[in-house]
Image: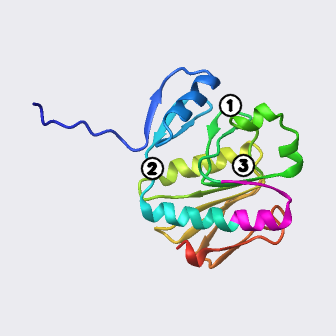
Amino acid sequence: MNNNTLSLPVPLNLEIDLTDEQFFQLCQNNRDLRFERTATGELIIMPPTGSETSDRNAELTYQLRAWSRQNQLGKSFDSSGGFQLPNGAQRSPDASWVTTERWNRLTPAEKEKFAPLCPDFVVELMSPNDSLEKTRSKMTEYRNNGARLGWLINRQQRQVEIYRPYQGVEILQSPNTLSGEDILPGFVLDLTTIW
């Protein structure tokens, strides 16, 4: 028996030519993994996060969902929700939100698969294995595809990067709260439970 172990990079990026339907089925058949696909078709396979990151992400999703339920202005999504961005990339932000007006324009079939739109609001909560450079690139991609507000939360550095259309990135050091501004009116994320 060979005791040599092959170590693969995390996340794993592969060049595989898949149709949108094949990609969707791959995701459905492998629910223990998270998949994304870049605009150029590169398949990204991400393992489940560690328990600490998962706990913080659940808190983030909980706060966004509670706000969304109260005001009925749109739909909130957790990290397992996928979106097909206008540039063709298929992404799954850690938390996201879409206005009711935009959501209601989708057909029932579009709502069942990866919704063909970029969320109005996206959050990426970095886990220890995430690359800051790649996560920043993903946030820029969201902004360039129509996200009106995005937060990159970097727990290790206790830093938040805020992405808005046609503006430079704003960086906050150790904030206790974040405002949803006029995109998510009245939403304030309590970061004390996420740091």
Residue in the image at 77% along x and 31% along y:
109
In the image, is residue 70 part of the stretch drawn in magenta?
A: yes
Instruction: Name the one closer to the observer, 53 or 130.
Output: 53
Secondary structure at numbered mark 3: helix
Question: Given the image, on which type of amino acid does mark 3 rest?
Answer: Arg
Question: Given the image, on which type of amino acid does mark 1 rest?
Answer: Gly
User: Which labelled disc corresponds to residue 88?
Assistant: 1
User: Which labelled disc corresponds to residue 69?
Assistant: none
Q: How is the image coloured?
A: rainbow
Position of 158 with respect to 110 (left or right) is left
* Quadrant containing the N terminus in the rendered view: top left
The residue wearing badge 2 is 48
Q: Position of residue 75 (x, y in %)?
A: 78, 53
Question: Given the image, on which type of amino acid does mark 2 rest?
Answer: Pro
Q: Which callout, 2 or 3, points to the residue nearer the camera?
A: 2
Position of 156 with respect to 62 (left or right) is left
Q: Position of residue 144 (x, y in %)?
A: 73, 44
Total of numbered circles in the picture? 3
Sequence-wise, the earlier of marks 2 and 1 is 2
Residue in the image at 56% along x and 21% along y:
18
Secondary structure at numbered mark 1: loop
Quarter occupied by residue 103: top right
- Which stretch did the figure color magenta? 64-77
The residue wearing badge 3 is 143
